[in-house]
Structures are given as C-alpha cells and as structure tokens.
Image (cartoon, grey):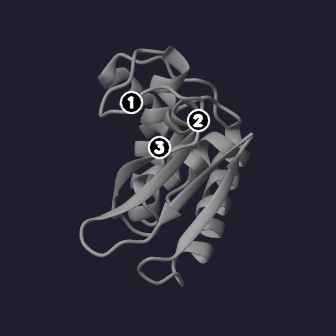
Amino acid sequence: MAVVVFEKRAGKYDAMLVTRDGRVEEIPCPKQRPIPHDMFHFAVETVLQKRGFMHRAAAGEGVGFRMADEPTSNAVERLVETMQADTWSGRPDPAEVIELFETTCAARGDAPFALDGAMITAMRAEIDRLAGLWEPLRVGERLELEIV
C-alpha cells in the first residue's frame, strides 16, 4: 500500500506528491474538471484493480510524459482518457464509453481489456466521490489517497 497526496494549487496545475525512500517527488497535474488528471488515474486503477501510471509511480518507477511500454498500463491510460471524455460529455450510455475506449486503444495500437456497464458505472461513482472530496478544498489544502 502507498499513499499519494494531491495538493490544490493556484494556476494551471495542481500537484501529486509521492513519497519514496523518505523523498517527496512532486508531479504536476493539469487542472481539469472535476478532478486533476492524475486523480482520474486513481479512480480507474482503484476501481478496476489495474496497474497503470498511479501504481507505477507509487512503486517507484520514474515518472514522465511517457513510461516504458507495458500493455495493461497502456490500455489503462487510454481508459483514463476515455473516462475524462465521458465526464466532460455528459456521460452517455456505457456501451458508447466502451466503444470509445476500444477505438482509442485501436488508434494508439494498444490492446483493450474487457469492460462492462457495471465497471463504467463504478468508475463514474468513484470519480464523483473524489470530486466531492476535491471540490471544497482551498488552494494549499491536500487530499490523501491510499493505493492498494
């Protein structure tokens, strides 16, 4: 288990703070509604119990705009993009979200994993839960999340 901390900041970026070996690594998170981009990773990876950016960063893998190829992790990234689009587009029928995920994977040459409507509903619920915790925070306040 690891803990990541999200800190609300002024400007275009919030921050994700990961502590490893007594050192804190700060990762800029583009501000996106309703939660920062990397918090979408937390929602998707936690609900589906899949290894993606969040788990890889917490495990000590160097972070950057492109991590080493890992098939599941690559598909998780496509799903994070898809769930952001889903949130911003008014949440269409889950079948459309699954189709968009598969299309996004195909466009990037990644292999999608199986999804169903219940998974989409669960990820939406987690995004909403996180948004409810994140929204009332003021600049400088933090939200701690456990990665299991």
The kind of residue on which mark 2 rests is: Asp
Q: Is residue 29 above or below residue 101?
A: below
Where does the image place residue 37, in percent across and percent down from the top left?
A: 41, 54
Q: Nearer the viewer, residue 133 or 91?
A: 133
Where does the image place residue 29, in percent across and percent down from the top left?
A: 36, 55
Circle 3 residue:
80
Kindly identify the residue that appears in the image at 35 percent across and 64 percent down: 32
Circle 2 residue:
21
Residue 84 figure quarter: bottom left
Kindly identify the residue that appears in the image at 59 percent across and 24 percent down: 113
User: What mark, if any, has residue 103 been given in the picture?
Assistant: 1
Which comes before the other along the chain, label 3 or label 1? Answer: 3
> Mark 2 against mark 3, which lies toward the viewer?
2
Kindly identify the residue that appears in the image at 63 percent across and 26 percent down: 114
The kind of residue on which mark 1 rests is: Thr
Residue pushed farthest left?
A: 11
Name the side, left or right, on which 115 lies relative to 137. right
Crowdedness near tag 2: few (<14), some (14–19) or many (≥20) residues, C-alpha within 10 Å: few
